[in-house]
């Protein structure tokens, strides 16, 4: 079957806080799919049956209709998917990356890109990912959890001092793109960190801060790609550093000893397989000055603009952006 015979539904946007990141990914993926000759229809599940007529305006203009999670059910169950061979999921965050949308597509019998329901849900839940890391001997920073209505600030401060001390990291349990994340360097910042993280989740992961270098490894077709080092100019790879041009430097392959690169790739595959991922993904690490690696998380639907991290690592392995998108589609079919 040639590409021109394959109908792809490009799912983009969504109702999570990472909506704008998704639209950036979707715009690049659309260009690649069109270049490859696929039949493509752009669908924003948060718009339901009221889909944008002008796709170009959709990617640059503000939303023209109310976003709703309920719309996901309506659109997946609609005639829009009657002739779809595969859905390319360019969504990020809740309701797109966490198994919710994958479940709806499974029920509808639509093939889709990325990991399946359980792996997507597990990877999105940082605490469950940590549990899997422990079981499969993936080295990861020490941690504990705060649930909603358990935010006794003094008790949390005492637990931090007992388990790992400052600095430490507060993360919403099921959010990405460093949204809601705070690095606490002392007691005075804890209360604010708790309030910030609870804006985005009902559970918080409090994690040991690992000084060192920011590293990431992509996995494609069960093979680890060359590790990439991220050097944020502001010292911390936050939302601004990720999505503002010129705010970070990217080195791929990372300038590390070959044995360290091999170890990172092995840990990446171990983390990827521990969660049960499929097709492709990205695994993030901290690497100390002694070359000890600590796995932070698994991304089942990482950013996919032509300048995102996975495409950069694919390019270092001799895989163009268009070939990367094509391989992801073929894997799913």
Image (cartoon, rainbow, N blue to C red):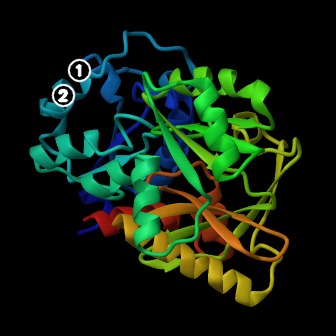
Q: CA distance from mark 1 to mark 2?
A: 6 Å
Is the residue 294 above or below the residue 241 in the image?
below
* Mark 2 secondary-structure assignment: helix
Whole-percent x, y for residue 43 in the image: 33, 32
Whole-percent x, y for residue 329 in the image: 35, 62
Is disc 2 surrounded by few (<14), some (14 to 19) or many (20+) residues within 10 Å? some
Is the residue 113 above or below the residue 138 in the image?
above
Residue at the location (62% across, 48% down)? Answer: 207
The N terminus is located in which quarter? bottom left
Report the side of 148 relative to 77 (left or right): right
* Mark 1 secondary-structure assignment: helix
Report the side of 332 relative to 171 (left or right): left
Residue at the location (41% across, 46% down)? Answer: 125
Q: Nearer the viewer, residue 58 or 121?
A: 121
Residue at the location (56% across, 63% down)? Answer: 283
Asked whether residue 179 is in view, the answer is: no
- Kindly indicate the quadrant of the structure image that contains residue 161: top right
- Kindly indicate the quadrant of the structure image that contains residue 6: bottom left
Whole-percent x, y for residue 185 in the image: 80, 38
Q: Nearer the viewer, residue 96 or 212?
A: 212
Question: Pointers 1 and 2 in contact (CB under 8 A)?
Answer: yes
Q: Residue furthest bottom?
A: 259
Q: Nearer the viewer, residue 248 or 181?
A: 181
Q: Which residue is mark 2?
A: 73
Asked whether residue 17 is in view, the answer is: yes
Is the residue 77 above or below the residue 127 in the image?
above
Is the residue 29 above or below the residue 174 in the image?
below
Report the side of 61 relative to 186 (left or right): left
Q: Disc number at residue 10?
A: none
Q: Which residue is mark 1?
A: 70
């Amino acid at each position: 079957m040639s590409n021109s015979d394959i109908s792809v539904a490009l799912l983009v946007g969504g109702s999570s806080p990472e909506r704008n990141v998704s639209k950036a990914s979707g715009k690049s993926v659309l260009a690649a799919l069109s270049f490859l000759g696929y039949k493509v229809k752009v669908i924003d599940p948060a718009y339901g049956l009221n889909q944008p007529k002008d796709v170009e305006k959709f990617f640059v203009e503000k939303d023209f209709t109310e976003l709703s999670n309920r719309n996901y059910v309506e659109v997946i169950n609609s005639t829009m998917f009657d002739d779809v061979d595969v859905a390319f999921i360019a969504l990020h965050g809740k309701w797109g990356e966490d198994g919710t949308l994958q479940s709806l597509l499974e029920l509808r019998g639509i093939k889709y890109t990325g990991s399946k329901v359980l792996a997507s849900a597990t990877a999105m839940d940082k605490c469950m990912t940590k549990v899997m890391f422990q079981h499969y001997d993936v080295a990861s920073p020490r941690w504990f959890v705060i649930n909603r209505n358990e935010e006794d600030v003094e008790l949390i401060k005492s637990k931090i001092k007992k388990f790992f001390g400052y600095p430490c990291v507060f993360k919403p349990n099921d959010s990405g793109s460093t949204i809601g994340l705070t690095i606490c360097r002392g007691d005075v910042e804890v209360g604010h960190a708790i309030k910030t993280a609870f804006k985005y989740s009902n559970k918080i992961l409090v994690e040991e801060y690992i000084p060192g270098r920011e590293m990431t490894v992509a996995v494609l077709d069960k093979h680890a790609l060359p590790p990439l080092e991220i050097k944020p100019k502001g010292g911390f790879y936050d939302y601004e550093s990720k999505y503002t041009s010129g705010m970070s430097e990217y080195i791929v392959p990372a300038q590390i000893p070959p044995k360290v690169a091999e170890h990172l790739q092995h840990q990446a595959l171990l983390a990827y397989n521990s969660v049960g991922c499929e097709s492709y993904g990205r695994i993030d690490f901290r690497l100390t000055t002694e070359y000890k690696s600590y796995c932070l998380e698994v991304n089942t639907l990482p950013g996919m603009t032509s300048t995102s991290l996975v495409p950069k690592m694919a390019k270092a392995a001799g895989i163009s952006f268009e070939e990367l998108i094509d391989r992801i589609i073929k894997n799913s079919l």
